[in-house]
Structures are given as C-alpha cells and as structure tokens.
Image (spheres, rainbow, N blue to C red):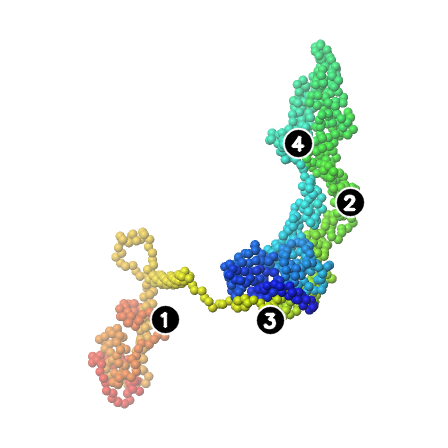
C-alpha cells in the first residue's frame, strides 16, 4: 500500500514539474506550489498578478491571509468556476460572503487528487455511466451515489480523492448507477429521484409525492402510455394496459346528432326514419310516415297511412283514397275499384271507368295502370317511396339500406343504432325480428345482431374490426384481446398474465380472482402499494417499514447474509462492510483513507485536511524542497501574513450626523416618557385630593344654569364625611391632652411617703387669673418645680413634649392642637373629651401651693430644715 502511495505521489510530482507554480487556498490558509488540481473556482483581479484556486468553503471580507483577502475584496475580482461549481456563466463577479461549493451531484476527475479535466453529473436516475477512467470523484453535501464494482453495489456518501485507496472488495472498474439527494422524507420510490429541494422528481408517466404510482392513462412498472386507439385501458402500476374502450372517430355527439353519422363537414346524416327534433338536435325525432317503437327505433307506418302514433303505430291520418281499417287501426284500406256500372273489380285489377283492367306486373293490387299505382306490390317486391323494388338474398331492399317487411309489404328500417342489417336466408316467410345488424353508429359495438354500447361479460371486442363482441373461451369467465387471454377464470382458478393458474407467482398477490403484480420496488408483497413489500430485490435491498430502499443510513452498510443494515466501524463515517478495513470515508477530521483503512493524515507545511475532500492541502500542492536543488518558488507577498486589523476607517459626516440625531431622538423620547409619567402621577394625586374634599362633583348644564338664578341663604349642611373628619380630629386632640397631663404629672409630687399637710409654698401658676389655654401654653416653658423650690438652676436640658407611642399619629402639630383646643366649641369638647380621674395627693398639694401664691406670683424660697417634713419631695 505504501508503495502505491509513493508511486502515485511521484507520478503526481512528475506531472507538475513542467508547470508554473499555483496557489491553492482554503478559508484561512493558502499554499504555493505545483498542482494539477482543478476542483473549485479560480479567483483573479486586475492589478493583482497572482491568481488563486479556491477550494470548497465560505470566504468573507475578513478571510486570511492578506493575499486572499485583497483578491476577495477587490472591486475587479472575477471567478472562474470548474465544472459543477458554476452557478452562472464563467468570469462572474464576486459577492461576499462567497460560498464555493459543488452543485448537487457528482464531479469526476481522470486523475487522483481531483486532477485533470473534470466532468459534472447532476442528480439523476439510472444513469449507468462508466467510471472506468475516473481516479477521483467529489460529491456535494447531502448527496449519495450508487456505484457498482463487479457484482457488488456500493453507496458513496463522501468524496474519494483516490479510487485506488478504496477497500479491496470495491476493486475493478466502477460504474455509476444513480445519484440522489438524501433530503427527501419519506424517501422516493425506485423510479423517483430525490432533488436538493427535498422533493421527488418523477420520470414521464409517474406521479405521486414519492413517484410511487402511474399517472392516469399509463400502466405497468415503467408507466407506459395506453395503446393508441384506446380512450382508457387497464392502467396503473400493476395494470396490464389492455384497452377498455377504443377511440371513437366522429361520434354522433360531435355534431349534435343522436341517430346519424357525422360527416367531415360537421353535418349529420340521419338513419332512415329519423329527422331533427324541435329543439334543434339532429336525428332525434321520427320523420313523417314513421313512428317510435318500444325498442327506440323509428318504424315505417302501414301502407296508406301518412302519420301514425308513437308506441302503438295506430294510424292518425290516412292517405287520400284510403280509409282506416275497422279491425286494425294501424292500417288504412284503399277504396274498392268499381266500374260505372257498379261492378267491383277483383284484386289485381283496377277500374278504368267502364271496365276493369289488369294491374301492372309489379303490382298485386293497384289503382292505376303503372307500377307507381300499386297498392300492394307483387310477390317478391316491396314498396319503397311509391315504387316496387326487389330485395337481395338477405332481404335488403334494392338501392337502400332498408330491410323487407313481409307483413307490411314495404321496406322497413333496421334496428336501433344500426347503419345496416340483413335477414339470413330471407324468403316470403321471413319476419323483421330476424333481422341482424351488420353495422353500428360510431361508439356502439355489435353483439348478437344488435348494436349496444359495450360488450357484455364473457365477451371481448374483436381487435380485427373493433366492432364485434366475441365470446371468450370456456376456461375464461372474462377475457380481453383474444378468447384465450383470461382476466378471470372459471373453476376457481386464478388469472395470471392471461393464463389460468392454481396459485399466483411470488411477485404477485391474489385479488378478486386474479393475480395482481406487486409494486416494482418489491420482490414479494401483501398488496399493490409501494409500502406493502415483504421482501426486496437486489436493486433496492433494504426493507424498512414495508418499503424497499436503496441504502441504509450513512454510518451503516447492508449485510446481504442477514438482509439487514449493520453499523460501520467507529473509525468509518461510511463503509462497504464490517471492520476497520472496509471504510469508504473516515469519521475523524485528522485521518485519511488508505486502502480502506483510516490512518493519521500527517499533513505537512502546517496544513490540515480540507473539509469534504478527504485529503490534506499539502497533498493537493507539491511544494519543492529547498534542499533538493530545485528552483525556488517565486515570492508572493501576503501569502502567509494575516489581514491587518489595526486600521480604522474614519466615519463620514453623514454617519456622524445620523448618530447624533439618533442619540437626540433617544434622549427626547426618554424625556417625553418621564414627563408623561410625572403628569400621570400628579393627575392621580389631584384626583385623590378632589375626591377626599368632594371637589370632583360634576354638574350638567341644567344645574349650572339654575345656579345663576338661585341663591341659597344658608350654606348646605356638612356631609357625613366632614362630620367624620371633625370627630377624628377631636379624638386625636383628646388623646393629645391625656398625653400632656401625663407629662405634667411626672413633675408633680407623688403620694407615696407623704406625712405632713400641704406646704405653704406659693403657687406655681395663677390658675384663677389665667384660662386653661394659657395654663397649658406656658406650663412647660417655666422653670421646673424643683428649681423654683430650691432656687438652683436646671442642670438638664429643657423638657420637650415626648414622642407619642400611639401608632395613630396626629395629623396636627402641637401649635395646631393648642389653638384648636382653644377655639373648639365647648359642647364638642365635652362630648369628645373623657372625664378626668381624681387628682393624686401630689397633684392636690401642688394645686394648693399654686393657689396660695396666685396673688403673690413667682419668687425664690430659701429652704429651711424643719425636720420630719411630710413633703414627698423632701423625703
């Protein structure tokens, strides 16, 4: 294997020595050297001397290296794709991002490593293309190809850089069978081709979403059109193609005709006895002198009757010289021939006035001397349009298509839809019911002497004249084409391909007494559908859910021994058999295929395996060694340097203007939203205040108009909400008074331990001269009781009103409380303020002191030790 690889490399190197250097690129890397690889697209630009060959991949404006980036971003860049890579004509302009990829199909190359002049094969069915001169091939994504190598069928899912490196079992000359996309779900039938769009493309004659059936008017496994001359046949993919109805040339309906034949000029020629109806339909009513019988035929009226009734044939109007028969209303009798002398002439004679003269030889009875005066024609002749004519041996009147009627002694019409008829072995005893049609109007067939629309069961339309219905053979219940081609058989036999058999062949199933062929995809089946297979043939070997498919999944192979799909070795992404030596492509991106096995790639020159090609970039380009004495490659700038990212393009003035306007717009939008939110909050608060104060009462125009002329002398009484607010305010003020009393009580004498009468100290307040409001307003602003008694200044901070512990804090300040208490009506105060508890001993003592000093006022008292004082502050 190594020797073959070395030989291939040497041959490849020898083939490129005489060539000039080329540059092959993938996204991110370019390599300079000698190469015969033609796969991809050549990128060039004016002003840049170096052209590069782009291998499959995507290229953008930031793709490295610098040389490739300059070519891609050049305004004059053009692309010259190789076969299979062209989306349009060559030398197309470049639009970024640029995707270089093979169109759905397969590209073949005569040399290994995608070298030489390539050819492209699109998605197709049953191409049967020889690949004997192909040494490498490339497949597009989501595409598989079926190839044959000897007697084995192999499914290829990946590109093959060197066919000689395939497994040993896939040796010999390859032949391409079909190329399909793998995107169709459900998969196409064996006749369809899956396209890149995920839909099945059907050959001519096939239909269905999976091309699983024949179009109308087509039959058989190949969906052939029905035979010529047939308007319908036994069609369908399991049909035999036998003609069910033939094509009718110039049927009566084509010229608005019923009982006649259409001519080339579009005119209808009516059968004898027929004429146009009153509605304009041609040959739809019986002509004068004819009546419509029970079979639908226009019969001629009896002799001497010019008009008779349909159905019964009773004469309505007799001809001149005739009278209606008394016994048979269908007849009109001729007047008897009498001479002037009153003598009645016998039959066969007529009266010339004075005597009786014999009739002409053509007449049996007559009214004159010529044959045109015959009432009843002589034996062997029959009346036709006033003349007596003879018949041939089959009873056809001379010069017409009418048949002789011995009962009426005249020429009568044939049966319905008959264009011609005859009476075999005609004689004077023959009757018209013995007449047999020999010709029919177009669209009718002949059966037992009558013209009918189709052949009955047990007969078939003779292919010799396409007119006569012929009986089938005794072994057939029904047949077609010939008496022995059975469609159904007698004696409980089964019809198979026209023969009667006891059991159906393996590729057919029994249905309604006949063997119906399986779908062409199936080897055996339980029904005619393509998903009713029970076993598969070699071309579609994989049986899955009743379907016969061409391939397993990509990482599986078909095991012919077990007729099942088996998993490939873990080193293979696709394979032709079990084990690591039957790989068709490698699952690792660092391995390449060598003789059916996946080995390490060991790419040189810092390259990697090109995605989708299965070969290193260094394998596709021969880089001469610097120590080999060969000529050095020409220097190309930017071949390995990355794209510079330090340069920044300055913004244009209009870009700056747009950015500024955008920022200003965003700021104004934010400011507008903030102000709108603030206005909503302010309006909500205003509405709440107006609702609390009853200011949001709206009046209509009538109330406002009456308000201009009506004066209310007294203000309206307060509503319930206002009274509730007053009560709440009074309750809060009462609570505040109790808290204030508690604070004052903290500075007065305590009852505990007192042993003497109230001290003669002067009073602290002049309660008699001051009202309650004055007492409360400056009580806390004076010096403390202790300072007044001892004469010592206060050491601590001035007392302040304590913070209330009640969670229902007042909405009114201390000043408001004081003023409101003074100004409030006494009645309301008495109602809302609870009764004070009785004073303590300390409070009583303090009160007595204040009363004693009311007239004196405040002064300093020098303390004197009296001993045993009962003052609670001295104990």
Residue depth check, mark 2 versus mark 4: number of the one nearer the observer: 4
Q: Where is residue 275, by image quadrant?
A: top right
**Going from the N terminus, do you reach mark 3 or mark 4 first?**
4
Look at mark 2 in the image and give the residue it sits on. Answer: 490
Circle 3 packing at 10 Å, graded few (<14), some (14-19), many (20+), is few
Q: CA distance from mark 2 to mark 4?
A: 40 Å
- Residue drawn at (76%, 51%) of the image: 505
**Going from the N terminus, do you reach mark 2 or mark 4 first?**
4
**Going from the N terminus, do you reach mark 3 or mark 2 first?**
2
Residue 133 position in % (x across, y down): 68, 58
Residue depth check, mark 1 versus mark 3: number of the one nearer the observer: 3
Residue 276 position in % (x across, y down): 63, 29
Near-viewer residue (772 or 359)? 359
Circle 4 packing at 10 Å, graded few (<14), some (14-19), many (20+), is many
Q: Mark 1 and 4 residues: CB-CB less than 8 Å, in contact?
A: no
**Going from the N terminus, do you reach mark 1 or mark 4 first?**
4
Residue 441's place in the image compared with 330, above or below, is: below
Q: CA distance from mark 1 to mark 3?
A: 99 Å
Q: Secondary structure at mark 3?
A: loop
Circle 1 packing at 10 Å, graded few (<14), some (14-19), many (20+), is few
Residue 391's place in the image compared with 635, above or below, is: above
- Checking the image for residue 626, the label placed there is 3
- Residue drawn at (29%, 67%) of the image: 828
In this picture, residue 193 sits left or right of residue 842:
right
Q: Where is residue 674, by image quadrant?
A: bottom left
- Checking the image for residue 260, the label placed there is 4
Q: CA distance from mark 3 to mark 4?
A: 100 Å
Q: Secondary structure at mark 1?
A: loop
Q: Where is residue 148, by image quadrant?
A: bottom right
Look at mark 1 in the image and give the residue it sits on. Answer: 808
């Amino acid at each position: 294997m190594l020797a073959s690889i070395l030989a291939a490399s040497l041959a490849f190197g020898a083939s490129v020595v005489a060539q000039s250097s080329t540059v092959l690129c993938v996204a991110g890397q370019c390599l300079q050297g000698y190469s015969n690889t033609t796969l991809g697209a050549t990128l060039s630009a004016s002003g840049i001397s170096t052209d590069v060959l782009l291998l499959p991949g995507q290229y953008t404006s930031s793709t490295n290296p610098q040389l490739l980036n300059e070519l891609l971003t050049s305004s004059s860049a053009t692309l010259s794709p190789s076969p299979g890579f062209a989306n349009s004509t060559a030398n197309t302009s470049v639009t970024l991002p640029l995707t270089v990829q093979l169109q759905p199909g397969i590209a073949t190359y005569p040399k290994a490593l995608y070298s030489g002049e390539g050819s492209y094969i699109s998605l197709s069915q049953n191409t049967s293309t020889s690949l004997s001169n192909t040494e490498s091939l490339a497949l597009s994504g989501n595409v598989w190809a079926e190839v044959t190598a000897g007697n084995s069928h192999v499914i290829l899912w990946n590109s093959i850089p060197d066919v000689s490196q395939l497994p040993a079992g896939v040796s010999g000359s390859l032949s391409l069978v079909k190329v399909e996309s793998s995107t169709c779900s459900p998969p196409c039938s064996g006749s369809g081709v899956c396209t890149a769009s995920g839909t099945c493309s059907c050959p001519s004659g096939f239909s269905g979403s999976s091309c699983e059936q024949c179009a109308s008017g087509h039959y058989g496994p190949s969906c052939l059109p029905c035979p010529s001359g047939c308007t319908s046949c036994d069609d369908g993919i399991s049909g035999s193609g036998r003609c069910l109805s033939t094509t009718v040339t110039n049927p009566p309906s084509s010229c608005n005709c019923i009982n006649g034949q259409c001519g080339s000029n579009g005119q209808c020629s009516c059968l004898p006895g027929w004429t146009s109806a009153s509605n304009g339909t041609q040959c739809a009513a019986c002509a004068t002198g004819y009546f419509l019988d029970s079979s639908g035929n226009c019969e001629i009226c009896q002799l001497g009757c010019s008009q008779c009734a349909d159905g019964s044939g009773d004469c309505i109007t007799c001809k001149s010289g005739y009278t209606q028969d008394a016994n048979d209303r269908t007849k009109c009798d001729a007047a008897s021939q009498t001479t002037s002398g009153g003598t009645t002439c016998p039959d066969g004679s007529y009266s010339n006035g004075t005597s009786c003269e014999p009739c002409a030889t053509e007449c049996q009875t007559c009214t004159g001397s010529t044959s045109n005066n015959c009432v009843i024609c002589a034996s062997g002749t029959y009346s036709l349009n006033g003349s007596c004519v003879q018949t041939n041996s089959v009873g056809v009147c001379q010069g017409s298509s009418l048949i002789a009627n011995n009962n009426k002694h005249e020429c009568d019409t044939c049966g319905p839809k008959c264009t011609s008829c005859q009476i075999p072995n005609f004689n004077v005893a023959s009757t018209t019911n013995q007449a047999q049609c020999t010709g029919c109007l177009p669209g009718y067939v002949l059966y037992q002497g009558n013209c009918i629309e189709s052949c009955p069961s047990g007969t078939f339309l003779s292919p010799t004249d396409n007119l006569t219905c012929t009986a089938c053979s005794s072994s057939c219940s029904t047949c077609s084409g010939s008496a022995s081609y059975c469609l159904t058989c007698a004696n409980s036999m089964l019809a198979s391909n026209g023969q009667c058999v006891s059991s159906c062949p393996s590729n057919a199933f029994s249905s309604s007494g006949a063997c119906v062929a399986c779908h062409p995809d199936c080897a055996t089946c339980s029904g005619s559908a393509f998903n009713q297979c029970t076993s598969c043939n070699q071309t579609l070997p994989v049986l899955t859910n009743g379907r016969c498919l061409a391939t397993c999944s990509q990482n599986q192979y078909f095991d012919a021994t077990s007729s099942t799909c088996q998993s490939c070795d873990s080193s293979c992404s696709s394979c032709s058999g079990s084990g690591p030596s039957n790989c068709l492509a490698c699952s690792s991106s660092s391995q390449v295929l060598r003789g059916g096995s996946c080995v390490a790639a060991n790419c040189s020159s810092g390259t990697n395996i090109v995605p989708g090609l299965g070969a290193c970039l260094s394998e596709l380009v021969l880089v001469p060694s610097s120590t080999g004495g060969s000529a050095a490659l020409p220097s190309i700038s930017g071949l390995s340097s990355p794209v510079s990212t330090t340069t920044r393009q300055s913004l244009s003035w209009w870009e700056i203007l747009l950015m500024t306007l955008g920022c200003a717009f965003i700021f104004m939008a934010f400011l507008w939203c903030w102000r709108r939110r603030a206005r909503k909050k302010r309006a909500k608060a205003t509405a709440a205040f107006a609702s609390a104060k009853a200011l949001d009462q709206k009046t209509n125009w009538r109330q406002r108009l009456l308000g201009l002329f009506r004066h209310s002398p007294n203000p309206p009484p307060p509503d319930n909400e206002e009274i509730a607010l007053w009560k709440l305010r009074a309750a809060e003020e009462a609570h505040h008074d109790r808290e204030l009393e508690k604070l004052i009580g903290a500075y007065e004498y305590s009852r505990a331990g007192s042993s003497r009468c109230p001290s003669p100290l002067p009073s602290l307040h002049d309660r008699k001269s001051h009202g309650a409001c004055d007492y409360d307003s400056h009580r806390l602003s004076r010096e403390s009781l202790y300072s007044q008694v001892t004469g010592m200044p206060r050491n601590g901070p001035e007392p302040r009103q304590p913070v209330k512990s009640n969670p229902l804090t007042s909405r009114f300040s201390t000043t408001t409380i004081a003023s409101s208490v003074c100004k409030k009506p006494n009645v309301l105060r008495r109602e809302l303020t609870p009764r004070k508890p009785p004073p303590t001993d300390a409070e009583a003592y303090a009160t007595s002191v204040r009363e004693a000093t009311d007239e004196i006022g405040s002064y300093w008292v020098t303390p004197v030790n009296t001993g045993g004082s009962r003052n609670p502050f001295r104990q």
